DNA sequence: AGGATGACAGTGT
DNA sequence: AACACTGCCATCC
């Protein structure tokens, strides 16, 4: 019996787990701002984590976009959002950089070499499970 | 309409 | 540590 149609093997590039439809865009900015408002005083959150807390995984850039076009006022703790490298995402030496850094330092956040220790000041806290596993390593 | 840009991030070299 | 590259996607030319 013939194999019927060689079929040339689809070999479709294995779609890399595309993200599902997610939410309807209207509420997106509010979801992000709500997440930012949850960052505790004296803590910082990375753009990526803000996105995740907001329920928008992998949309770190979107967080930056929303913050940029959001009126800074109104007690929104925008300054508690920094990048994954533990650094402020404004050019060093810019007014924006200075403003953000001062606000954070005023809350007790310490910069070392222009960076914040995310293990200490990062929110949400790092997964304890991993930490425990690290502690349990055999000697 | 299509390319460049950006308050980003993960991975690889 | 410093790039390069890729994914991501709203905005802005």
Image (tube, coloured by chain):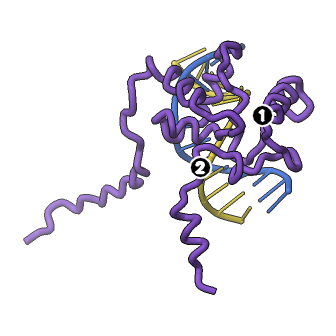
Chain colours: A purple, B yellow, C blue
Say if C1 sits above or below A104 in the image. below
Residue A91 lies, in percent from the top left, at: 85, 33
Name the side, left or right, on which B7 lies relative to A24: right
Q: Earlier in the sequence, mark 2 or mark 1?
A: 1
Question: Viewer-proximal residue, A70 or A61?
Answer: A70
In the drawing, what numbered circle is on residue A125?
2
In the picture, the quarter occupied by the C terminus of chain A is bottom right
Residue A126 lies, in percent from the top left, at: 59, 53
In the picture, the quarter occupied by the N terminus of chain A is bottom left
Name the side, left or right, on which A78 lies relative to A16: right
In the drawing, what numbered circle is on residue A39?
none
Question: Viewer-proximal residue, A20 or A114?
Answer: A114
Residue behind mark 1: A107
Q: How far apart are labels 2 and 1 at the CA level?
A: 18 Å
| Marks 2, 1: nearer the viewer | 1
Local secondary structure at mark 1:
loop
Residue A95 lies, in percent from the top left, at: 88, 23
Say if B8 sits above or below A8 in the image. above
Residue drawn at x 43%, y 51% is: A16
Q: Residues within 10 Å of mark 2 (few under 14, many from 20)?
A: few
Residue drawn at x 87%, y 28% is: A98
Q: Residue furthest bottom?
A: A139
Question: Viewer-proximal residue, A42 or A23?
Answer: A42
> On what subunit does the disc labeled 2 rest?
A
Q: Kindly check if marks 2 and 1 are in contact, taking CB atoms under 8 A apart as contact.
A: no
Residue drawn at x 89%, y 27% is: A94
Residue A58 lies, in percent from the top left, at: 53, 41
């Amino acid at each position: 019996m013939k194999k019927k149609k060689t079929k040339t093997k689809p070999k479709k590039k294995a779609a890399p787990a595309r993200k599902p439809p997610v939410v309807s865009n209207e509420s997106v900015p509010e979801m992000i701002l709500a997440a930012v408002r949850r960052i505790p005083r004296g803590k910082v959150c990375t753009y990526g984590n803000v996105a995740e807390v907001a329920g928008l995984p992998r949309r770190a850039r979107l967080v930056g976009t929303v913050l940029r076009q959001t009126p800074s006022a109104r007690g929104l703790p925008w300054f508690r959002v920094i990048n994954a490298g533990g650094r402020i995402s404004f050019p060093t030496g810019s007014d924006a950089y200075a403003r953000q850094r001062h606000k954070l330092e005023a809350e007790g956040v310490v910069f070392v070499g222009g960076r914040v220790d995310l293990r200490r000041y990062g929110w949400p806290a790092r997964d304890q499970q991993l930490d425990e596993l690290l502690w349990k390593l055999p000697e």
